[in-house]
Amino acid sequence: MLNFEFYNPARIVFGRGAEEKTGELAKRLGTKALLHYGGGSVKATGVYDKVVRSLEKAGVPFVELSGVKPNPRLSLVHQGIKLCRDEGVDFVLAVGGGSVIDSAKAIAAGVPYDGDVWDFYLDEEKGPFTALPIGVVLTIPAAGSESSTGSVITNETGWLKRAMNKEVLIPKFAVMNPEFTFTLPPYQTACGASDILAHMFERYFTQVEHTDLTDRLLEAAMKTLLIYAPIVMENPTDYDARAEVMWTGTIAHNNLLNTGRIGDWASHNLEHELSGIYDIAHGAGLSIVFPAWMRHCHKAKPARFVQLAMRVFDVDLAMEDDEKIIEEMIRRLETWYKRLGLPVRMSDAGIAGDRIGEMAKKLFIGQPEQGNFMRLTEEDALQIYKLAL
Ligand code: NZQ
Ligand code: ZN
């Protein structure tokens, strides 16, 4: 196990009616909020009204900026930064999913910064070292951004999708009512589940030895998700199943399960090239990339895969041959994705694959080292994309 520091200040307020506390929680963050949300689902579902009621009750003034798109765009972030400066906003309240939260984080980091906030996405040395405080009302379990250090933004100039990661970006609170996820379209539920699983895979595939506690925590969380995601697909209003998935989504990405180990993360970056160019949902990109990454990279340490196959995917060890066990596990994973209605090849998502050479090249722009479980070359990336066609 490696040395580590673990710090996560996000207060999680979880359960039925949790949103009623939004106003009081927000009041602790500042004097005027930017209320940031997406394309309208929060108005259609009634979440917006509930949040506004709570803000008004607590006497929290706010201005609004809506229109965050999935795979959030830099241009709206620039608009938000200007609005906050003009209006004297001193904290940001994100109501929505990972895209809204990531856009809120970018705005929060950009307001006190003299340069272009995009700098942070290209060069982690630049920061951010300070940001406006962020609060969250979460409506989809997926990205884990409600308590993560990350923000992922797409720059429309060149369609580069890049991440920044800093502790100052961890939200101060996240209100999480599983009932808010009842209204999710099945495809979004599935994409969210795929992203949650991917966050655990990324951490699980490590070359660090003696990580037994976090291995077993990850295995428990993965099992929970593998069981409950199909249940919520069948019965979208099953509160307890929704609650299991929602809490797993946060635990998967708040860095507790990262402690003492180094995750891989190449699959996420391989995926960001897909969703950056083709604008598909991140979770759908991950269900395409992960089986291919596993087939290409398992040889870097087959024992990791055999352990996962045995403990999480219940593959019978009597099969003996490691290659057979691993292939059976990948096959079971693909079956699970398909059961959720997710693509497992680019062709399933209508992606022709004629730009994979360009994607393999772009992958290394601003992020020259890809993968810690297995360090990838451009040729490796190309081979993985080929396996995913
Ligand atoms: O825009 P609206 O109208 O709100 O609709 C959204 C959106 O179309 C809809 N939705 C959300 N909650 C709903 C709902 N519809 C009905 N009922 C509800 N309760 O769902 C759609 C997807 O929302 P989005 O926020 O894009 O989903 P997600 O949470 O999966 O976020 C994806 C983004 O997060 C990034 C991804 O790359 C992607 O850009 N990630 C962020 C990370 C982080 N910050 O730590 C880590 C992740 O690995 C990921 O890369
Ligand atoms: Zn992800």
Image (cartoon, rainbow, N blue to C red):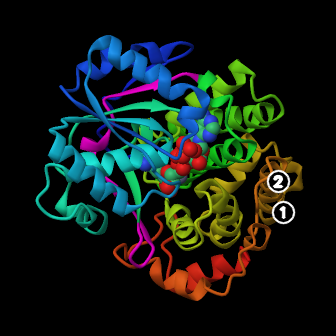
Q: Note whether 137 is above or below 310 in the view shown.
A: above
Asked if 138 appears above or below 299 in the picture, the reply is: above
Q: Earlier in the sequence, mark 1 or mark 2?
A: 1
Check disc 2 and report the residue beneath it.
338
Q: Position of residue 354 (x, y in %)?
A: 66, 87
Q: Position of residue 3 (x, y in %)?
A: 31, 44
Instruction: Look at mark 1 in the image and give the residue it sits on.
Output: 324
Mark 2: few/some/many CA within 10 Å (<14, 14-19, 20+): some
Q: Nearer the viewer, residue 30 or 375?
A: 30
Q: Is residue 110 left or right of residue 4?
A: left
Query: Which residue is pictured at 14% across the width and 38% down the height?
Result: 88
* Residue at 79%, 68% in the rendered image: 348
Circle 1: element type: helix
Q: Which quadrant of the structure image shows residue 59?
A: top left
Residue 8 in the magenta stretch? The answer is: no
Q: Residues within 10 Å of mark 1 (few under 14, many from 20)?
A: some
For the record, the magenta segment spans: 155-177
Q: In the shown orientation, is residue 49 left or right of residue 223?
A: left
Residue 329 image offset from top left, x and y in percent:
79, 54
Q: Amino acid at mark 1?
A: Lys
